[in-house]
Amino acid sequence: MTPLRDDELREMLRRWEASPVPASLEARVFGNQRRVRAGWLWGAVRVPVPALVLAAAALVGLATAEVHRQREMRLPQGMVDGNLIRAPGLEGVVKLRIHIDSDGRVTGTTALRGDPRLVPAAIDAAKQRVYRPALLNGNPIAVDTQVEVSFRVDVNVVTKRGDGQ
Amino acid sequence: MTERDFRSAFDDHKGAVYNFALRLTGSAATAEDLAQDCFLLLLRHPGRFDASRGTLRAFLLGVVRKLAMRRWREEQRLEPLDDDPRTEAPGDIGLLVGAAVRSLPPLQREAVLLFEYEGFTLEEIARTVEADVGTVKSRLHRARERLRHLLAPLRTR
């Protein structure tokens, strides 16, 4: 097939029109303007740092495992009881879209990316967070945003016990 | 930067910033995140914009580009779970054109977006993407060659 000429290409590219800017963008930017100006919030509603969950599990055959809790998040017990965290290389990041209501509570989650085996724990962790709600004209509003939940095995808190010694 | 200055910058450039992010990433949710971070960066670090080095719009689009690149690097190690429900799905010719542009390698894609949709000169693009003019010209040429072939089947539609 004959490639497009210059004028045809330009005409074709024009067919991809601009999209309207969602009203929520203004709410997100100006809702957090005051806090950014006050110097105590960066990242706005995406809030603090991606949630970090540290999970520590005993190696196979060991009697004890400790779950390290950080940033008010915890890993569901089931994750530790199963083999998931013990599996080598099962560290990773799960990206979620979350809906934060005007009280700062997470009321909706959709998993976007990540290891499917970590998704349930990531959702559980995200729902435990309470965020500072975004403000619009001084009033708290609900927003959708994305967060990442990171998992890693923390070897420092793995305790080797019950090994028959 | 005063509140009025910031409001004015937002009103003047929100469309360009959001649409550049949207065309770059193909995801409405990601574009909104990038646009938000871009404006909040301006609010937090207004001194990073140097009017002697280019326009405010070029500065903001450069910020979006850097934020998008960082995201791509982070997401390369992630496994997609599902289609982003708020991401455009090809349907009409405009969206097919968008899909073709987004299929370009990132450096070629940004060159096309800045040249064709933002009306930047080669020099402005070079400053924004921190490359020399010859490199930008070459990227643009390769991108256009590819698009000529990719979009040729749409000629009669």
Image: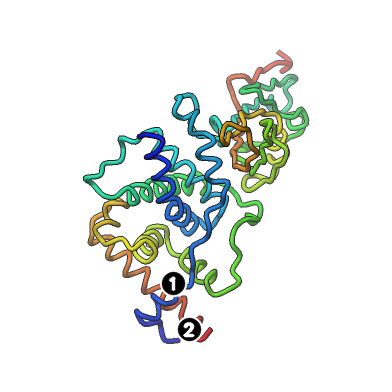
Element class at badge 2 = loop
**Residue A82 image offset from top left, x and y in percent:** 76, 33
Subunit ID for the residue under disc 1? A
Task: Measuring from the top left, give residue A61's x and y in whole percent.
Answer: 74, 25
Q: Is residue B76 above or below residue A99?
A: below
Circles 2 and 1, Cβ within 8 Å, touching? The answer is no
Counting from the top left corner in percent of width and height, residue B92 is at 58, 73
| Residue tagged 1 | A14
Circle 2 Cα neighbour tier, 10 Å, few/some/many (<14 / 14–19 / ≥20): few
Q: Kindly identify the amino acid type of the residue bearing the numbered disc 1.
A: Arg
Which residue is at a point 27% across and 65% down the rendered structure image? Answer: B137
**Residue at left offset 69%, top offset 41%:** A119
Which residue appears at 41% of the width and 61% of the height? Answer: B109
Q: Which of A32 and A149 is in front in this view?
A: A32
Q: Name the residue under label 2.
A: B155
The amino acid on which the numbered mark 2 sits, given as a three-letter code, is: Arg
User: Is residue A105 or residue B68 the one in the foreground?
Assistant: A105
Residue sitting at the far top: A165
Local SS, label 1: helix
Q: Using the image, determine if residue A159 lies above or below residue A1.
A: above
